[in-house]
Amino acid sequence: MEKNKFRILVYIPILAVVFLIIGAMALYFILKYSHGEGTAFEIIFIIVSLVGIPLLLFVSSFITMWPCVEFCKKGIEKTLLGKKQRFISWEEIYEIRRINAGITIWIFFSKVSLEGKKITACRLRKDNIFVVSTPDVEQTINRFAPSRLLQK
Amino acid sequence: MYAYYANNTVMHVDPSGESFLVIGGAILLGGLIGGFIGVVSRSDDETVFGSFIGGFINGAVNTTGLAAALATGGTGAFLWAAGSGLVGGGLGSFVSQYISSGHVKLGLVVASSLYSATSNLLALYGAKYFADIYGVTWGEKFVSAIIPSLGSFVITSTIAFVVLPNPNRFLYVQNTSLFNQTKSALKIDFSWR
């Protein structure tokens, strides 16, 4: 059976967890080997930069990139931890838009035209589902998407 | 829509997982360059080994974060660049200081974190808006991943050698006889700037 369920971009939340673990360990050792020296500002800055920001990166990447996107004959469903977040039928999709972010290509299945919109604006919209392009994803799209969307 | 991919989306998409080996190579290269810069710009009281390992960690974390920033895109990319700079700079400074002297100055960790985060943000901005990097093939992805990192190294090196001394050098000059000084004497004096 061919795969039709994909995580949006699995590497980024994992990397965020790694950063968080490294940052927490570094914080522990930095405070241990500074022998209680340093001002309150320095300590707060180090806590925020080594744990606070990696935690923010993890939470944001977990919400936006960890969910699964499942393709079927009816449409596309997005789930996070097994809980349904969004479903868009193929009939509702206006276009499949690809945006190159640098080293990944993001595919947006949108109910409206995303012409001229930047990637952040596209991600914030509630009327689309997005996933990072891989050969498996592309083949799955070709298998399920109506020809009118593939020809656009 | 498919004109960008020469009308063949399957042949030009990211081969799942495999291109991340390319990114791994870029991270290793970034670490080695960071280690080299760490050694070249080390202070008199820093050991070669300590400055190399500290620089390697900083370079590898920065390159990883900048690759993640390029993968994420959008405004989130700048959060990744800054975050990796803060973590990489702080961790690199800690490791370098600890290996070299067994003691860690929080002021230097803060300075190195800010230093690294600023370099990353400038490098990412430059790469996105001036170099216009967009990788499609593996080679292009490798170049895309390493360009912001190289830019960050150039900015860091320029600041270290031309504009300001390396924060680590500044620390250890102040703390030549670290354990014989009083706590008040160990406070960093920024007035010279």
Image (spheres, helix red, strand yellow):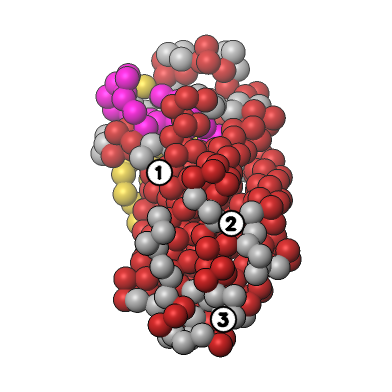
* Chain under numbered label 3: B
Marks 3 and 2 in Cβ contact (< 8 Å):
no
Q: Can you see residue B161?
A: yes
Residues at discs 2 and 1 both on one chain: yes
Residue behind mark 2: B58
Taking the spot 55% from the left edge, 75% from the top edge, the residue there is B175
Quadrant of the drawing holding the C terminus of chain B: bottom left
Which is closer to the viewer, label 3 or label 2?
3
**Earlier along the polypeptide chain: callout 3 or callout 2?**
2
Of residue B62 and residue A61, the one placed in the foreground of this image is B62
C-alpha gap between disc 3 and disc 2: 25 Å
Q: Farthest residue in the right direction?
A: B49
x then y, percent, for residue A15: 53, 56
Residue behind mark 3: B178
**Pointer 1: residues within 10 angstroms few (<14), some, or many (20+)?**
many
Q: Amino acid at mark 3?
A: Leu
Taking the spot 59% from the left edge, 13% from the top edge, the residue there is B6
* Chain under numbered label 1: B
**Pointer 3: residues within 10 angstroms few (<14), some, or many (20+)?**
some
Which is closer to the viewer, label 3 or label 1?
3
x then y, percent, for residue B66: 52, 44
* Chain under numbered label 2: B
Of residue B145 and residue A111, the one placed in the foreground of this image is B145
Residue behind mark 1: B78
Tell me where the magenta segment starts and ends, as one range: A96-119
x then y, percent, for residue B55: 63, 57
Examine the rendered structure and indicate whether residue A150 appears above or below residue B135: above
**Pointer 2: residues within 10 angstroms few (<14), some, or many (20+)?**
many
Quadrant assignment, res A138 = top right
